[in-house]
Amino acid sequence: MIRAASELTRDLNTPSRAIYWGDFLGSTMVGYASMAGAIMADGWLVSLGFGLVSILTLYRASLFIHELTHMRLSAVPGFWTVWHMLIGIPLLVPSFMYEGLHNTHHMRRKYGTADDPEYLPLSHMKPWTLPAFVLISLLGPLGLLLRYGILAPLSMVIPPLRTMVWERFSGLVINPDFRRRAPEPAIARHVRLTEPPAAIWAMALITMVATGIIPLAGFLTALAIVSGVMFLNQIRTLVAHLWDNDGAEMSVTAQFLDTVNVPPPSPLPALWAPVGLRYHALHHLLPGLPYHALGEAHRRLARELGGASTYAKANRSGLPILVSELMRRSMGAGK
């Protein structure tokens, strides 16, 4: 399957600069314009409408952090810098919080083990952990403000605190037992470039809200939108895998079958799993393939391998099916 995937998609490996820039900049502009509309709207219903549009589009723009982790930055010059200026710094999610960690999730001998920062055996946990897993994400923006606006500056003068901040609060991870190791040189450089401006922005934001320069109502509206972005991402994370592993090392086939594709015809996954993440199982087969090529790659593989193949077993029809499957397995584990 891996060989077939590689051979059938060899011509799809080059990122389209036009697609990357057009998609990202369009999503970002609509997202911030809609956020402004939600803040200034006259009436809660209009504000809610603007807010939902802002959540969906800023969510899409923020998920380019996944592409930054896998692509050669020289393939789309300037994209890393502009993404940080428009999304990474303003939303307090610089790419170093994903770089070097997400790659571990793709390592064959670490996927699904205690060393995987992006894996939690939800299928083997109590049923109440599923809603708790999703709802905790609503506190994400406050956690990021605390991490960058308070802990980051304090950690510059308190070395033991710096160690804790790096090990426990410097990664977009879901494994609570994971501790981040010291960064490699390339990632350390990204930290030096992006953590200080993120900390300055967080401190300025806290100060402006505390002094009334930014009205509290507008700040809370923006905070609710960013919480919505993180909530939507957590729902996507909840159904990105089947979470069946109990910590043991898995075969390549088992890893693939623990991961999910949600291909067409349903259009809704394009909203809750955008930027190619509806093809998550395919992405685990070909992690370097640009997001805009995954749809064509899936069609080729489905046509070549057929409906009875291992590849087809990773496909699901939509979000309700995935959630019900996970709940059923979790309830079985609870019993």
Image: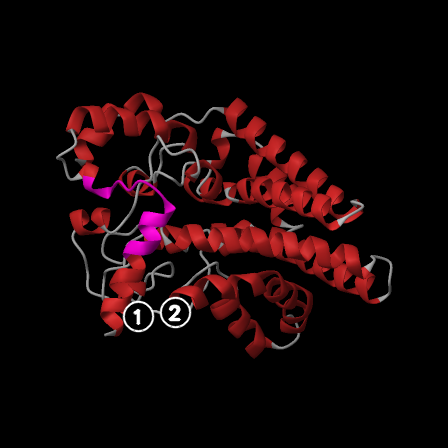
* Image position of 103 (left or right of 6): right
Residue 253 relative to residue 15: left or right: left
- Bounds of the magenta span? 313-325
Judge whether 81 appears above or below 235 on screen: above
Is residue 161 within the magenta segment?
no
Q: Is residue 328 visible?
A: yes
Q: Position of residue 48 (x, y in %)?
A: 67, 47
Q: Quadrant of the C terminus?
A: bottom left
In the picture of the structure, the residue carrying the numbered disc 1 is 125
The Cα atoms of the two marked residues, 1 and 2, are separated by: 7 Å
Residue under label 2, please give it: 129
**Quarter holding residue 26:** top right
Front-most of residues 170 and 230: 230
Query: Would residue 175 be seen by someone viewing this image from the given angle?
Result: no
Which image quarter: residue 21?
Answer: top right
Amino acid type shown at disc 2: Thr
Q: Determine which quarter of the picture holds residue 304.
A: top left
Residue 249 vs residue 127, the one in the foreground: 127
Question: Total number of numbered labels?
Answer: 2
Helix, strand or loop for the magenta stretch, by majority: helix
Element marked by disc 1? loop
Q: Report if the CB atoms under discs 1 and 2 are less than 8 Å apart.
A: yes
Who is closer to the viewer here, 219 or 45? 45
